[in-house]
Amino acid sequence: MSKILTGLQPTGAITLGNYIGAIKQMKELQDNYESYIFVANMHAITIPQDSEELRSNTRNLIALYLACGIDPNKNTIFLQSENPYHANLSWVLECNSYFGELSRMTQFKDKSSKNANFTVGLFTYPVLMASDILLYDIDYVPVGVDQKQHVELTRDLAERFNNKYGDTFKVPEPLITKSGTKILDLVNPSIKMSKSSENKKGVIFLLDDLEVARKKIMSATTDSECVIKYDMENKPGISNLINIYVSLTGKTIEETENEFTGKNYGEFKRCVADVVVDFLSDIQEKYRSYLNSTIIEEILDNGKNITINEAKIKYDLVKMRIGLTR
Ligand code: AMP
Ligand code: TRP
């Protein structure tokens, strides 16, 4: 069976964009792949975090994975920080990465330009991500399009290592959702919907109060044309709502356009809001019940044991290949 792996950072609240770009894909793939899903809490500390907040966000994210339908019987669910091999392999890969190639990472350029005091961790972050993937012979990495460049770097690092030291790593491929790959900000549909957006009105959080979420959809930025048609370039606001609708209902873009032919934006938004609110209400109910159960402890203990055993084998091979053994 082919293997897939993905991770999310436990920084702030998880958005509808995260769900559609990453979690939903994992849920759809879990029946047909050997699946790994983890909390990238070591990636989170590339920017300053409050320790109590980080701890509770981490646990909340596990509960949210489960609430979103990630099945612990079909997935290995774990915390990145509980497996020391991620950081170990990352060091080895850093010593096989070029300063130039890491400097070209769009996300690094973006984040470092916003804060003069960025950390070295922010710079080497993609290498840690490569190590998350390469430890487990992963075939496909389901991510939103913004992470594609990091998976491509992972491929380059794997190929470089294999060429230099002999076949060691499987070369993974990114898996990007076809529809709704990038969910946009509702207020400013020229940027992606992001946890860290300053204007929270543009972002639907999975744990948003239901009425607040409804209002956010109802006041989403659209255009003056009053035609419900998918056109990312000229009608990003409407197209974004179509993407959300399509992703949550399983309908196609064409079916959606037909369904709303002749309807006005208000009617369309009401339907999108209903779908979003139903979806959130279901998730939130499940989330609360998982958060109060001991199942999270059991799942994480299990994930820790499985991934440490597996990662050790790969890391031992790496050490042998490069001469880090006696
Ligand atoms: P981040 O929120 O940047 O930690 O991203 C976590 C995962 O969610 C990654 O796989 C991203 O590609 C995906 N993701 C984040 N925001 C969006 C968005 N607005 N649309 C689609 N996917 C997203
Ligand atoms: N960097 C990813 C993000 O911020 C999270 C992540 C860390 C990840 N390691 C990964 C995603 C490995 C996929 C595979 O969204």
Image (cartoon, rainbow, N blue to C red):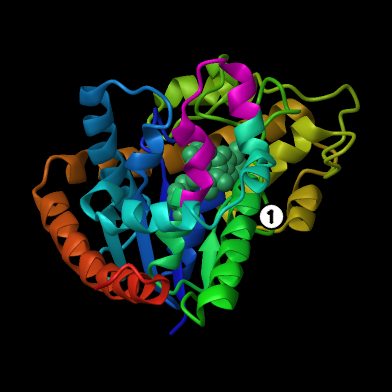
Amino acid at dot 1: Ser
Determine whether the residue tagged by mark 1 lies in a helix, strand or loop: loop
Q: Position of residue 21 (x, y in %)?
A: 56, 49
Q: Position of residue 89 (x, y in %)?
A: 37, 59
Q: Position of residue 254 (x, y in %)?
A: 79, 56
Q: Which quadrant is home to the C terminus? A: bottom left
Total numbered badges shown on the rendered structure: 1
Q: Nearer the viewer, residue 155 or 55?
A: 155
Q: Is residue 58 magenta?
A: no
Q: What segment is highlighted magenta in the picture?
A: 110-127
Q: Nearer the viewer, residue 95 or 155?
A: 95
Task: Please state if 107 lies on the left or on the right of 34 as rendered.
Answer: right
Q: Which quadrant is home to the N terminus? A: bottom left
Identity of the residue drawn at 46% across and 71% down = 138
Q: Relative to 179, does residue 175 appear above or below in the rendering?
A: below
Q: Relative to 324, does residue 52 appear above or below in the rendering?
A: above
Identity of the residue drawn at 69% across and 55% down = 179
Q: Position of residue 8 (x, y in %)?
A: 42, 45
Q: Nearer the viewer, residue 40 or 290?
A: 40
Q: Quadrant of residue 316?
A: bottom left
Identity of the residue drawn at 71% across and 43% down = 242
Q: Relative to 283, does residue 174 appear above or below in the rendering?
A: below
Task: Please state if 305 lies on the left or on the right of 216 as rendered.
Answer: left
